[in-house]
Amino acid sequence: MTEAITDSESAELSAELSAEPALFSTMATMRAMRRLSPEPLSDELIDQLVQAAVWGPSGGNMQCYEYVVVTDPAVMAELAPLWRRCVDAYLATTGKYAPDGMDEAAYGRMVATIEYQRDHFAQTPALIIPCYRFPAPRLEEEGLRASAEALGPVATAALAGGQERFAALAEGSCVYPGVQNLLLAARGLGLAANITIWHLMLEDEWKAALGIPDDMRTFAAIPVGRPLGRFGPVRRRPVAEVVHRNRW
């Protein structure tokens, strides 16, 4: 979860992945990279990232996504105070403590990279903000009756009471696969990137600063640039700890 790796870790990972498809190596070394060179990125390079995102799955093939790309240093400087407020709010609450099982020293190194990115945000080469406007559902009485019959009365009532969560997940499922494609493409192109949603704490101010329509939702703020550190193995829980085969 930090950007510093040892030569032995790198060699060990290379040996493990030597027989795997190239995509596996990309995923296994796709750390959140927050120390970015201020070197500008070309429009062509950024378009490659957005193209990768557009190739992602789209619920109902509706493709109602839009991507705001910020590369103008003046606009980035305008956003920097908003970013600082969001990061500081995160570090004062959820980000104040290391996750269970994570070494305090390792977490301290990760926080240091977050603070570095906060303090150098105005020099970020590119910021990509995926947006989505979910279309109003076309509901007909006959269709609603058929749906209720298929689900049954208990599930129909539960669905009616959980529409807000269902809608949020439906939108997210149309956006985040594309975001993952974008992150994979960035890693494959040797670029550093990380996904954040801290901007949502001040979403209205971010949307106002960027002219994003009120009815358009934003789902992430992704800083992108050339890395100042080295890519290295991600540290995640073993598969054996997270898999429940056939039933929980």
Image (cartoon, rainbow, N blue to C red):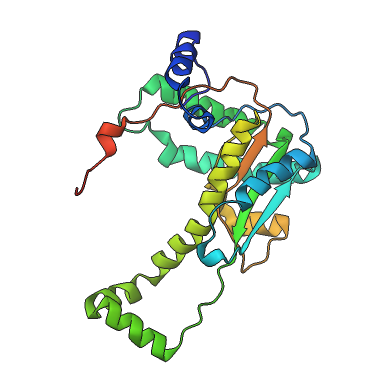
Residue at 71% x, 55% y: name it: 209
Is 152 left, or right, of 105 in this rendering? left
Residue 11 in view of the camera:
yes
Taking depth in this image into account, of 99 and 32 the one nearest to the observer is 32
Is 209 left, or right, of 167 in this rendering? right
Residue at 26% x, 40% y: name it: 243
Q: Residue furthest top?
A: 8
> Is residue 119 shown above or below 94?
above
Residue 192 in view of the camera:
no
Q: Which residue lies furthest to the left in this view?
A: 247
Residue at 52% x, 17% y: name it: 4
Q: Where is residue 50 in the image (x, y as percent from the top left)?
A: 67, 47
Is 167 left, or right, of 66 in this rendering? left
Q: Where is residue 208 in the image (x, y as percent from the top left)?
A: 69, 59
Q: Position of residue 5 (x, y in %)?
A: 50, 16
Taking depth in this image into account, of 208 and 240 the one nearest to the observer is 240
> Is residue 155 shown above or below 173?
below
Q: Which residue lies furthest to the bottom in this view?
A: 141
Residue at 50% x, 78% y: name it: 137
